[in-house]
Image: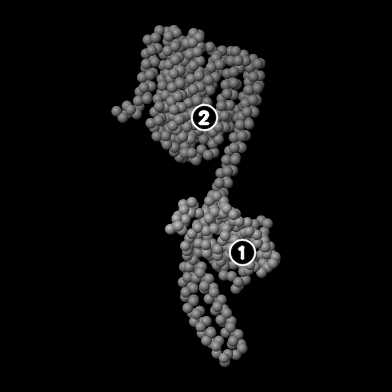
Amino acid sequence: MRVVRRNRWFALAVAVTLMFAVLCRLTPRGYGRNAVSDIAYFLLILAVGLTLAWNAWSASAITRRFWVLMASGYLLWACNAGGWIYYEVAKHRPFPDPCFMDLFLFLHFIPMIAAVGLLAHRRPPEQKFRVGTLDFVLLLVWWIFLYAFAVFPSQYVDLNVPVYDRNFGVLYLVESSVLIVALGIVARGAGAGWRNIYLHLMLANGLYAVSSQAVNVAIARGTYYTGSLYDVPLMGSVAWMAAAGLSARDWRLEATTLRQDSDRWGAASVRLSMLAIVSLPELGLWTYLRDESPAPSKTFRLFTVLTAMLALGVFMFVRQYLQDQTLIRLLEDSRRSFENEQRLQSHLVQREKLASLGQLVAGAAHEIDQPLNAIMELSEKLWSNERLSGEQDTWLRKIVDHSQRTRDLIANLLSFAQQSSGEKKLLDLGMLVQRSVQIRELQRREQNVRIESHLDPELPQVWGDGHQLFQAFVQIAENGLEALEEAGGGLLRVSAHARGEEVVVQFSDSGPGIKEPHRVFDPFYTTKPVGRGTGLGLSAVYGVVQDHGGHITCQNEPQGGATFTIRLPRARADSEKLALAAAKS
């Protein structure tokens, strides 16, 4: 029962084909049979087009484009079938040969080939390089050119029915063969659902191609008439296509990732495009040297070749330009991703370095602090002895000074190793930056040093420890001012503004810059003379910013000077509400 339900549409297609065959046999040859055959053929093709359009309505993204293109092809085909109804049923006249409605029959394969070229069974990221619209336009222009080159001269320029029938039949066979081969190629790498669609459409179109060629042979022999048995396989092939479209709604159309060696269609489509462009000069040369058609037809073909060369050349140029722009954007994205990955890696290494060093210096500082206290205590007792000579007193004073300097260093080490996150709350970052600048401005000694601040008055709040961030800003401002004082003066610019979901604070000085900006956050790295710095200040700043979920970078500017950039996440709305609720309670 489940098998019958799964194949119900194909069973219905077989039933419709048999019913059509019975009607053709029971209906006497003449107007009645013509009407039954033409109307049934038209309605069935129209039903296929509407079915595929219905599939597009419930599909998404590239799958929708596949069904839209397929439906467009069948609706063009229905226009040609409607022409048969117009002449044979409405006008009671044979379908003319040639007829302008043949163009619709020829064009209906083009959207179908374009739909196969979309490779709808692939995952969307693999479609990034494809410019589908231009590919479709190129395909359309190329097939219209072939029709104009091979068929138009014997249809409109210099009427020649046998030549027209021969050229149209050959070109139509080539076009249908391209669709069949394309469906077979893409079916190889598709998932189960898409493979079913491709294979059923390939087999149905194969049956249609064979049947249409049999009809052409029968027309040439004068044995064909509308509603004859030659139309039964044609009707069966169209019913098969309708069944495939209806069954597609029950199949799982899952996108798959293809292996490079199993995907032949991508490379084949590029080669076919290049072959189409390269073949134009050869066709023009053949027309000029070997074409034995009448002069008007020959001239028409030459102008057709020149027009196609111009149109396809423009489209190829635009397509290559768009593809180059896409590649450039991908390279930029790759470069930014690589830089972000390097930055993240350096942050991780720095954090691990600081964590390991913190544990090391904490233990070392405690071990050194005890003997150092004993040295200072004994030195003070010795200093109180009045029997020391002047030279001994000088030596003892140096011992005490160096011991005191060592104690300060230990205090810095312990402060660095014992950094804690502290209590965090909503902060006005602009006020903290302004206070840090004002303090350093009051303490500066060099009159040639100027400080400029540009703070956004609508700066959003951040979530953090105000004391730690204030000390971090003071430390960075002090580094910049010291660099300017050593250079004999300059300008320190301090700015704070919102950028997306971040608050960005920058300290830029016009000094000589930093010799190794990538190392400034390493512990114990300093360019100051011995005795003037421990190299732990910026390392502590780095730890504070990391603890607040932010990032800090240092770089030299091309015009001179260094810039420290701090990025902190702005407080979310839910955090602000929680803080207000806590304050009210």
On the image, numbered disc 2 is attached to which residue? Answer: 114
Residue lying at the far front in this picture: please name it. 584
Marking on residue 438: 1
Name the quadrant of the C terminus: bottom left
Q: Residues within 10 Å of mark 2 (few under 14, many from 20)?
A: many
Badge 1 amino acid: Gln
**Front in this rendered view, residue 451 or 232:** 451
Q: Position of residue 35 (x, y in %)?
A: 44, 11
Residue situated in front as seen by the camera: 434 or 582: 582
Where 131 sits versus 495, above or below? above
Taking the spot 54% from the left edge, 87% from the top edge, the residue there is 382
Q: Image point 57% across, 49% down: which residue?
A: 335
Q: CA distance from mark 2 to mark 1?
A: 68 Å
Residue 472: give x, y in percent of width and height.
Answer: 55, 63
Report the amino acid beneath label 2: Ala
Q: Is residue 385 above or below residue 149?
A: below
Q: Which mark is residue 83?
A: none
User: Who's the residue at 57% across and 84% down the image?
Assistant: 396
> Is residue 219 toward the left or the right of residue 450 in the image?
left
Q: Is residue 372 above or below residue 200?
A: below
Observer-nearest of 474 and 143? 474
Residue 479, position in %: x, y? 61, 65
Q: Is residue 231 left or right of residue 503?
A: left
Does label 2 or label 1 sit earlier along the sequence? 2
Q: Is residue 47 visible?
A: yes
Reply above or below: 237 against 312.
Answer: above
